[in-house]
Amino acid sequence: MNRPQSSDQRSDSAEYLKRKVFFDQLITVYGRKPVLEILEDTKLDIYRLHLADSNRGGGIIDQIKQLAQQRNIEILHHNRSQLARISRNSKQDQGVACDIHCPGYQPYEQAIDSLITGDPKVLIAIDGVTNPQNLGMIIRSVTASPCYGLLLPTKGVAEISSLVIKASAGTVFKGTILRCDSLHSALKNLQQQGFKLCMLSSHNATPLANISRDQSLVYILGNESDGVSESIASLCDYRVGIEMNNGVESLNVAVTAALVAFNTL
């Protein structure tokens, strides 16, 4: 027999869920110069600064500490193995990492309710895009566009790194980035919720301009060498292409993302 929860238990559960949502929205950045630049941007909501005990004082480390103290940011000290678990890149973290709170960066499941209510929504999804510059430029274009956001798998694509942040011109912290563990499962779920899946292709494709905007859509972009993977292509409702002239066969994936994202206007 299940016993009803007490008010304290319900409160604890609600508090746990609130904290989980918050921690799901953190982006961890590592490296001395990237962290210093982030601390200098007062518009960013920085949750914690992480420093390795082995860091020597002076120079950029002192600058980082001073800025964190001025902004009342919590500073935590770790041994090297602990910091490596936080940065997930012990070879390049340089003994420094920080957590930035980004409300738009979240598991896609947390956005389902808003995705399926109200006016039709448009998402851009990427499949196998491993070049960090391309990912950063895609994030920048999607953030600037009328699209709802970017659907980003946690595996098989470039990770959010200092290169991605630089290429995005900092928009990675401002945009809506919906994470998914499995792109295939996420797309299938969205399809069941009424979204139409459109893979970008240069073969036997419907012109982008002919796709009705009166429906919720996910445009899926693959990497430049292989395109959209077969497993993802098998789910798609439409093959969509961008009409080109003068014998040009294809565009850089970041350029394609920009054209698709602003086609929703």
Image: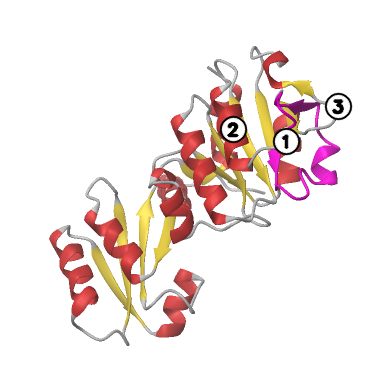
**Pointer 1 and pointer 2: residues touching (CB < 8 Å)?**
yes
| Residue in the picture at 46% in, 40% down | 140
Query: Camera-side residue: 143 or 110?
Result: 143
Q: Label 3 amino acid? A: Asn
Residue 48 appears anywhere in the view:
yes
| Residue in the picture at 44% in, 38% down | 175
Q: Secondary structure at mark 2?
A: helix
Give the vertical position of 207 relative to 109 (above or below): above
Disc 1 target residue: 189
Give the vertical position of 170 relative to 69 (above or below): above
Q: Rounded to the nearest whole Å, what is the CA distance between mark 2 and mark 3?
A: 32 Å
| Sooner in the amino-acid sequence: mark 2 or mark 3 | 2
Give the vertical position of 119 relative to 146 (above or below): above
Outermost left residue? 70
Residue 68 appears left or right of 169: left
Disc 2 target residue: 112
Query: Camera-side residue: 161 or 54?
Result: 161
Give the vertical position of 219 relative to 119 (above or below): below
Q: Label 2 amino acid? A: Ile
Disc 3 target residue: 204
Query: Camera-side residue: 242 or 18?
Result: 242
Q: Rounded to the nearest whole Å, what is the CA distance between mark 1 and mark 3?
A: 26 Å
